[in-house]
Image (cartoon, rainbow, N blue to C red):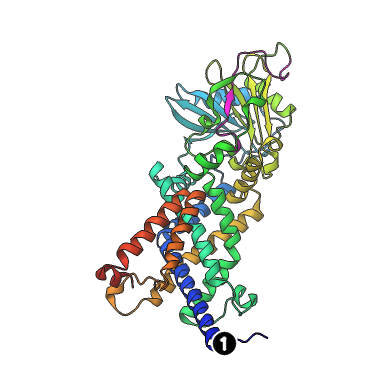
């Protein structure tokens, strides 16, 4: 027979309640600190994401949705290219972007002294419809802000910290809103009350609904970032160039990026094949020179229908590159991604990389980036629009809740959530910070710094303690 000491049981229950309350306070405080940094970045990312989403869907990034009147048959690509090149004095032809439909313009890139100009040409008449500096439109401004705040590496790191801390927001937010005896209905459906309670209910319910999607967007975005993506993930997930039975160039595929990311994630760090050998498989018929027209005909022959991109060889070892991927809005199916390299001297196909050849991480990124950018057609455009608006609402509602919770005392203008009484939790927070640092270095470093500042300064110096409380 076991006897239970009522006083002991009550004390144990009280201790468990105190620990739970302390953990809740710790999660709330971390949620608040992460939000202080993340909110302006998330609003920026959502707004610029919406701009790029709709500009690409409605007007295109490089004028590729300029309409033309279809005729019996288009002119040879070389005739169209000659008109484009002649329109830019001293220009060198670098790229051809085939129209995605019969009633749309062809696009050519022409460079003069490293200044790139995009020229839209009527494929039936070779009439110049428009020309403009490459990557100079509203889409590109939004893209550059979205990527690095126009601050280069510094901006990239700042955004990577925000995206990494977004993981902390998701984890702490889920813990704070997780139903504890109230049931999932109350957690998933906002309560239509008034004041701060309404904002809290809307914030929690919408946050719970979009948490998985937000996690996906953060991971796919971080995979492009300079530390977590490029240094930790991407470098180990590239297509192995050794599979190509061809000599390799000193250049990697990333050299084909011009400002924003343009090369498929799985190929960016992979060396380019080089022209000038007998390697490869038959492409052009023996004795057929590699020209714009013959390479375009080969592209159509091997399966590049509608829109695709042709990059012309640069230098004696350069190759003709044919590509199609959803990241560049060439197609709406990421599993159709394909990159083909052709020897400029022999016309042999040196490499033919398809979605099936990507590593598991490469395949995940091909699909992930298409979802992230909303390039899967109008359903993904609408879904991404709803998601971006939800993120903006979460940021705004978080600020509103903070404002309504602020005390009347003007000294405590920051009004951070109360610190946990159980200090052992903050020792545990340091351990958690170290674990996060291993997975997401920028977030881990930030958490450790903020945790130490909170412990060493904000709660020990009276003036600072009044400011945050």
Residue 61, image x, y percentages: 54, 42
Say which quarter of the image contains residue 78: top right
Q: Measuring 65% from the left and 53% from the top, which residue is drawn there?
A: 378
User: Going by the picture, which residue comes out furthest to the front?
Assistant: 1
Q: Residue beneath label 1, please?
A: 5
Residue 252, can we see it?
yes
Decide which of 61, 1 is in the foreground and name it.
1
Q: Is residue 274 above or below residue 265?
A: above
Quadrant holding the N terminus:
bottom right
Does 316 sit left or right of 337 as displayed?
A: left
Indicate yes or no whether the magenta region holds residue 369: no
Does 399 sit left or right of 339 as displayed?
A: left
Quadrant holding the C terminus:
bottom left
Q: Measuring 52% from the left and 50% from the top, which residue is drawn there?
A: 439
Question: Mark 1 packing: few (<14 Cα in 10 Å), some, or many (20+)?
Answer: few
Residue 160, image x, y percentages: 46, 49
Decide which of 9, 440 is in the foreground and name it.
9
Q: Measuring 27% from the left and 74% from the top, which residue is drawn there?
A: 411
Q: Measuring 63% from the left and 30% from the top, which residue is drawn there?
A: 240
Decide which of 384, 455 is in the foreground and name it.
455
Say which quarter of the image contains residue 387: bottom right
Q: Is residue 392 above or below residue 308?
A: below
Residue 149, image x, y percentages: 41, 48
User: Going by the picture, which residue comes out furthest to the bottom?
Assistant: 6
Q: Magenta region: which residues? A: 266-285
Residue 184, image x, y percentages: 64, 75
Decide which of 125, 10 is in the foreground and name it.
10
* SS assignment at label 1: loop
Magenta: main secondary structure: loop
User: Going by the picture, which residue comes out furthest to the top?
Assistant: 287
Does 141 sit left or right of 356 as displayed?
A: left
């Amino acid at each position: 027979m076991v006897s239970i000491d009522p006083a002991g049981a009550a004390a144990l229950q009280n201790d468990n309640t105190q620990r739970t309350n302390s953990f809740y306070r710790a999660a709330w405080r971390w949620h608040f600190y992460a939000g202080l940094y993340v909110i302006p970045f998330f609003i920026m990312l959502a707004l610029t994401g919406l701009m790029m989403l709709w500009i690409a869907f409605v007007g295109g990034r490089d004028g590729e949705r300029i309409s033309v009147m279809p005729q019996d048959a288009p002119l040879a690509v070389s005739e169209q290219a000659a008109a484009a090149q002649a329109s830019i004095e001293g220009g060198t032809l670098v790229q051809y972007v085939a129209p995605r439909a019969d009633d749309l313009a062809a696009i050519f890139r022409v460079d003069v002294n490293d200044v790139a100009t995009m020229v839209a040409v009527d494929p039936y008449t070779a009439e110049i419809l428009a020309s403009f500096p490459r990557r100079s439109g509203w889409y590109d401004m939004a893209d550059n802000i979205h990527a690095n705040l126009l601050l280069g590496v510094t901006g990239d790191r700042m955004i990577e910290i925000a995206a990494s801390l977004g993981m902390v927001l998701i984890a702490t937010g889920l813990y704070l809103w997780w139903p504890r005896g109230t049931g999932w209905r109350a957690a998933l459906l906002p309560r239509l009350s008034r004041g701060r309670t309404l904002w809290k209910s809307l914030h929690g319910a919408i946050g719970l609904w979009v948490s998985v999607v937000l996690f996906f967007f953060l991971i796919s975005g971080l995979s492009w970032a300079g530390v977590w993506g490029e240094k930790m993930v991407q470098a180990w997930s590239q297509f192995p160039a050794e599979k190509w039975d061809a000599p390799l160039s000193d250049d990697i595929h990333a050299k084909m990026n011009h400002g924003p990311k343009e090369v498929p994630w799985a190929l960016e760090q992979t060396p380019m094949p080089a022209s000038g050998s007998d390697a490869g498989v038959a492409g052009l018929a023996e004795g057929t020179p590699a020209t714009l027209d013959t390479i375009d005909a080969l592209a159509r022959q091997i399966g590049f229908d509608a829109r695709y991109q042709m990059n012309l060889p640069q230098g004696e070892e350069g190759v003709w590159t044919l590509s199609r991927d959803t990241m560049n809005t060439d197609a709406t199916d990421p599993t159709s991604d394909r990159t083909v390299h052709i020897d400029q001297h022999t016309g042999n196909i040196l490499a033919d990389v398809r979605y099936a050849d990507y590593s598991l991480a490469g395949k995940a990124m091909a699909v992930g980036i298409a979802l992230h950018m909303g390039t899967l057609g109008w359903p993904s455009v609408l879904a991404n629009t709803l998601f971006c608006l939800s993120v903006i609402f979460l940021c705004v509602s978080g600020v509103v809740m903070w404002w309504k919770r602020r005390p009347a005392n003007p000294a405590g203008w920051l009004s951070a959530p109360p610190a946990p009484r159980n200090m052992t939790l903050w020792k545990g927070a340091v351990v958690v910070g170290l674990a996060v640092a291993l997975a997401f270095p920028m977030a881990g470093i930030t958490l450790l710094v903020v945790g130490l500042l909170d412990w060493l300064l904000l709660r020990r110096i009276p003036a600072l303690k009044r400011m945050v409380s």
